Each structure stands twice: as C-alpha cells, then as structure tokens.
Image (cartoon, coloured by chain):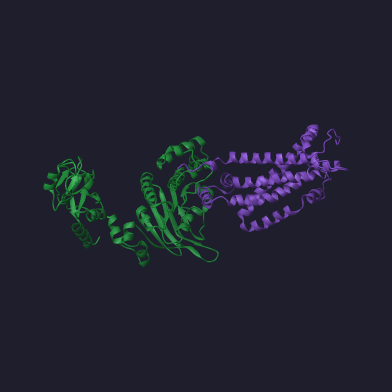
Chain colours: A green, B purple
Amino acid sequence: MIRFESATKQYPDGTLAVDALDLVAPSGQITVLVGPSGCGKTTSLRMINRMIDATSGRILLDDQDVASVDPARLRRGIGYVIQHAGLFPHRTIIDNIASVPLMLGRSKKEARAGAMELLERVGLDPRFAQRYPAQLSGGQQQRVGVARALAADPPVMLMDEPFSAVDPVVREQLQDEFLRLQSDLGKTIVFVTHDIDEAIKLGDQVAVLRVGGRLAQMATPAELLSNPVDDFVANFVGRDRGYRALGFESVTALPLESEPTVSLDSSFTAAEKAAVDGWVLVLDGERRPQGWLAVADGPSATGDTISTATLRRGGTVAERDGTYRAVLDAALSSPTGRGVIVGPDGTFAGTINASRVVALIEARAEAPR
Amino acid sequence: MTSMTSTSSSPWHFFGYFLDHRSQDLSWLWTHAWLSVVPVIIGLLIALPLGWLSRRYGWLYPPMVSITGLLYTIPSIALFVLVPPLLGLSSLNPVQVPIALTVYSVALLVRVVADGLASVPDEVNQAATAIGYGGVRRLFAVELPIAVPVIAAGLRVATVSNVSMVAIAGTIGMSNLGQLFQLGKDLSTPTAYYPPIVLGIVLCVLLALVLDGLIILLTRVLTPWRRAVPSR
C-alpha cells in the first residue's frame, strides 16, 4: 500500500507542483492519477520512488517512509515504466529486461532465463531477445519497458503515461494485455495518464487532480462518471458520461424476446417464411449469430440458398449478463432494432429492443441505490 | 647519423632514403606513435571526470569549455619549452612532450566528453535512474557506452592532431619523426635535399591513418548496437 500524507512539492520559486496530497493506493490494485498538464500527476508519481523529494509531508510504502530508504535501493524494488520506454539502446532486448536482476546481484544466466520468460509473458516473440531496441516498433519497445519493470518481481509498479506514445490501435492492445497481466500478477500500481478514457478503462480507482496539484476527486470509475464532485471533474470526465457509466453496471434478469432463426445452410425459401418484418437472424451450426438476412436482398446468385455476402453483420452482440452499455449498444446497432443477446458460450439467447433496455435503465434509476 | 649513402635529392627518392636509414626511421616512427597515443589516453582519463562534472553541474560547462579551449591556443612549441621550467624538470626531459600533449588532449576532450554525455537521450537517463542506477554506476553502465560514438569522434581528432604536434617536438631535439624535418633542413645547404622531409610527411600521414583506423575499428567493436537496423 502506498500512502500520501499531505505530501507537498514546492519549487524554490514558490510554485506548488503538488499541494498537500492525501491519497491511498491500495495493494494489488491499479490507482490512476489523471488530470490536465500542470496538475502534478507525474511529480506525485516521482515522489514515490524519490526521483523528486517531497518538500513537506511524507509518503509511506507499506508503512515505511520512503525518505528513510536509500533512493537507488528503493528504486530497485519498484518497477517503473515511462512514456517512450527509455530502453537502453546499447543493450539487447534480453539484457535490457535483465538490468535490475543483474543489479541486484543475480547471476547472468538466471537473470537472462527470467528475462526470456517475461519476454513471452508480455507477448513478444523470443527471437526478439538478441535484437536491439532500435529494431523494434514503438509498441514492442513499450512491451519490453513493461517486462524490464517486472523483471525483479517488484510488488509496486509506477507507470508514467506508458501507452500514450503509440497509435490508438496498439494502445488498446497494450491496455488490454496490461489488464490481463495485472489480473495474474496483482501488483500495486500507480498509473499516470492525461487521458480520462484510459483512466476509466484501467483504474480500480481514479484520482482526478486539478492544476496546482490538488486532489479534486478520488473514486471508482463508475462513481466518477455517475457522481462527479464538481464542475471541474464533470468537465474533465467529459461528454457521454451518462452513457459511459452504463458500462460499469451489469444487467440482471434481461427480459428477452424469442426470435425466429435459420441456420446458414437452410434454403432461402425457409428463411423467407421465418422472417419477421422482412428480417431473419442467421446462426451457424453451433447456434452462434452470424448476421441478419434481409428478405428483400433475395437469395444467393447460385440458387435457393442464403447468401453470406448480403448478411448484415454490423450489429454488436451483447452477453446476457453484460453491462447496460453493451446491451443498449447491441439494440442500437442492430439493423432491425432488435439487439442480439448471447449466452456465456456465445450461442444465441434472444433479442431485446432499445426501448425495453431504456425502460430497464429507468427502472433502475428510480430505485435509489 | 647524417652520413649520406643516397645521392639523389629528388623528393621521390624518399623510399630509397627510408631503406638506407631503416632502423633509425623505424625507431623514430615507434616513438612517434607512442608519443601520439599515450597523451590521448591519459588526456581522456583526465577529461572524463572534468567532462562529467561540467555535464552534471551545468554552470561549469561554459567556463570549463572556455578555459580548456584557451589552452589549445597556446602554440605547441611554446608549451614544449615552458613545461620543464613550470614543473621543475630539466629541459629535454623525456616527459616534457607527453605532458604538453596531454594538456592539448584534455583541452580537446573535456568538451567532447561533456557533449558525448549530453547525447544520451533524456528518457534513457531517466529510466536508468528510475530502475535504480546510482550516479557512478549509471555513468559507466549506461551513459558512457552510449556516448562512445561522440567520444570516439573526438579521440580521432585528438590523436591525429597529436601526430602532427609530436613532429614539432622533433624540431626541438626530441627523438621522433620530426627529426626528419630538421635533418632535411640541415642537409639542404647549399642545395635543397628533399627525401627526409618527404619521408617524414609520408610516415606521419601513414601513422595518422593507421591510428585513425584503429579507433574506428575499436568503436565498431564497442558499438554493435549502432549497426542494428530496423528489421521491418
């Protein structure tokens, strides 16, 4: 557990970078510090491993004041990932990852064996081991950065905008893998970002800081979206927050409609007969939804069969016990207005339309939680 | 030693001159090589802490670079002559030339070391600090290896310029290839006699090329990572 006790960083010219910050980052969870530039989020992060020393107040790491620990020794026990990875250009990937174990006095063989395991754990091909950082893409380098931070198996990880220098597609991959990794490892993580969406996606709890280094609100992502403490937080959390908040609540007892379906290999004539309002849902052999067939599109060019080319596959599919957001999106994105709902094994369970989902959401809102 | 077995005074006769005085010329070449290299090595060892300091404490950089730069403007012949009295040595002491050349090497290399350390990307330094490299450890494990290309470029300049300055020390009586120029001058009365002068130039250039090549080779060995090209 990391505990800030009115930690303050004031520069000699009087500027307050962090102003009496009180905050607890619980063990085994991801605590995200988020805020506009100048809010002191990176300064706060660096006060934990003493890259910046607090001018007053203190920071406790498992009840020990970090100011009482030698900085270099303190840092070897804390993983650190920065924006551009900061890999050592003169060392191979494997030796980059093995840096901290070697510093801690482990044998070269042992350190490299551990590094090979980590390389795979962060999703990199073992053949990258002998390459140099310049030979890797930005996203790959960032994975190596994460592996290097994990190499000595530190209980605490500090991450300073680790995914913000890569393109959005890679960023999303890295975020997903990071969450998967964390669910295995259960590290105590403090994560800094300026991106509220990233904060909400990754954080078990999110601390919103305002310019001048003051804590505006500390809450779970759902709480932050549904109950921002003031205008600053509300504006920072941004638009669509009512809709985004639905992503944190699972539906219970979804009232599903039955829906006529046909399988991929049935004839077009059978599909035409089954259709409701000119649409019929097509399933594969394992009863997984494939798309909607519009009767008006006609049969396939080769005869009385269903044409896979004209299947409408645009709609999203939600799980029966998914979030309100997923279920509502399934209804809104369906070309028929009937949202496709599946069971946990991906087989078709039924449909629901948007007005019924909204009714559910309203019913939930009427009963104060 | 100035006995003349060769007779042609054509500049192109330098090779014949070399063959006739081979053992003397080779011994001068050998001393010349040592006098060129050792001061650079000692100069680098002195410049490393000075360069590190002027990088570590930014305010030191301008005065450090100016002062060491000024040293370089002292004419070499004056420095050779001044070193013995300043250090209380007898004149024509064998260490006077290495000491003077070390001063020049330091003058050149302090800036090179400071700039080399400055060439290390900021995020690399930050990452090194953040994962627990202390000051000295970071210098040797991270900063210096990455600064090798910049420092090596400075070493090449220092070494090659030392080769030419050692020759000047030859004209004040020190035993090296510079003696060939003195000899050529002495033998040029009453008529010009070029072979030793041309030989001196040729050997100096060859020596400079070989030493330069050695530094390039050493740099390549030390920086395999620079040849690693993006594989996609």
Mark yes or no: residue B96 visible: no
Query: Is A298 in front, or is B160?
Result: A298
Q: Quadrant of the C terminus of chain A?
A: bottom left
Location of residue B54 in the rendering, given as x and y in whole percent from the top left corner: 64, 54
Instruction: Locate residue B66 relative to residue B142 in the image: left or right.
Output: right
Q: Is residue A161 above or below residue B182?
A: below
Determine if residue B16 is in view. Answer: yes
For the point 18% across and 49% down, which residue is it? A297
Residue reaching furthest left?
A: A273
Between A114 and A293, the residue placed more toward the observer is A293
Residue B200 in which image quadrant: top right
Residue for point 77% across, 40% down: B198
Which of B19/B57 is in front? B19
Left or right: B121 with respect to A213? Answer: right
In the rendered image, residue B118, in percent from the top left (x then y), is placed at: 59, 52
- Give percent across and percent down for residue A158: 45, 51
Task: Report whether A95 appears left or right of B100.
Answer: left
Q: Is residue A234 above or below residue B21?
A: below
Which residue is found at the position 79% from the left and 45% from the top?
B169
Q: How many marks?
A: 0
Q: Position of residue A185 (x, y in %)?
A: 39, 44
